[in-house]
Image: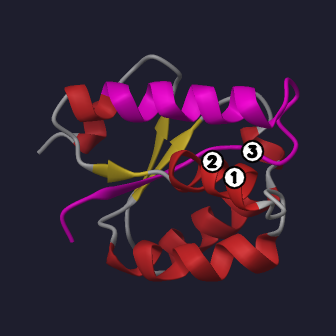
Amino acid sequence: MTFWYLGSPYSKYPTGLYDAFFQACRARGLLVRAGIPCFCPVVHSHNVAEICGMDPRSHAIWMPSERPIMEEAMGLIVLKLEGWDESVGLAEEIDFFREKNLPVVYMEPGVVPAEVFG
């Protein structure tokens, strides 16, 4: 386990799916610049859904696709964008990592959490 899983709100993000994608890209870029390896399903899958005509909001499509990646991650970074605490998918991700007794770290936009170093 050598990477973090970066979860963020998406489906019901108040300013739309593209903005949720954009904000997730910014957060992942910040983490990568800080030397923190991470995978973000929103960054990875938003364009795939758009290009391939797939429902970007379908948990039935995306959660099984991302589950194997969650299985290999060292912990979850929760990007605290507006609505993060109401996101169904993010709640599933938090529950998954807590059930596995893996760290769940909360990230304010624009700030790399100290807990991810070391």
- Residue on which the image places disc 3: 10
Res 113 visible? no
**Distance from Cα at disc 3 to Cα at disc 2:** 13 Å
Q: Position of residue 81 (x, y in %)?
A: 67, 29
Residue drawn at point x = 79 percent, y = 51 percent: 87
Task: Specify whether residue 110 is painted magenta.
Answer: no
Q: Are marks 2 and 1 in contact (CB under 8 Å)?
A: yes
**Secondary structure at numbered mark 3:** loop
Q: Position of residue 104 (x, y in %)?
A: 45, 55
Residue drawn at point x = 71 percent, y = 43 percent: 9
Task: Specify whether residue 24 is painted magenta.
Answer: yes
In depth, the one of 95 and 68 nearer the eye is 68
- Residue on which the image places disc 1: 51
- Residue on which the image places disc 2: 47
- The magenta span reads 1-30
In the image, which is nearer the foreground, mark 2 or mark 1? 1
Q: Check disc 1: other Cα within 10 Å, few if <14, some if 14-19, many if 20+.
A: few
Q: Is residue 36 above or below residue 107?
A: below
Q: Is residue 50 above or below residue 115?
A: below
Q: Quadrant of residue 24?
A: top right
Mark 3 vs 1, N-terminal side:
3
What colouring does the structure picture have?
Answer: secondary structure
Mark 3 vs 2, N-terminal side:
3
The N terminus, quarter of image: bottom left
The amino acid beneath tag 1 is: Ile
Residue drawn at point x = 79 percent, y = 37 percent: 17
The C terminus, quarter of image: top left
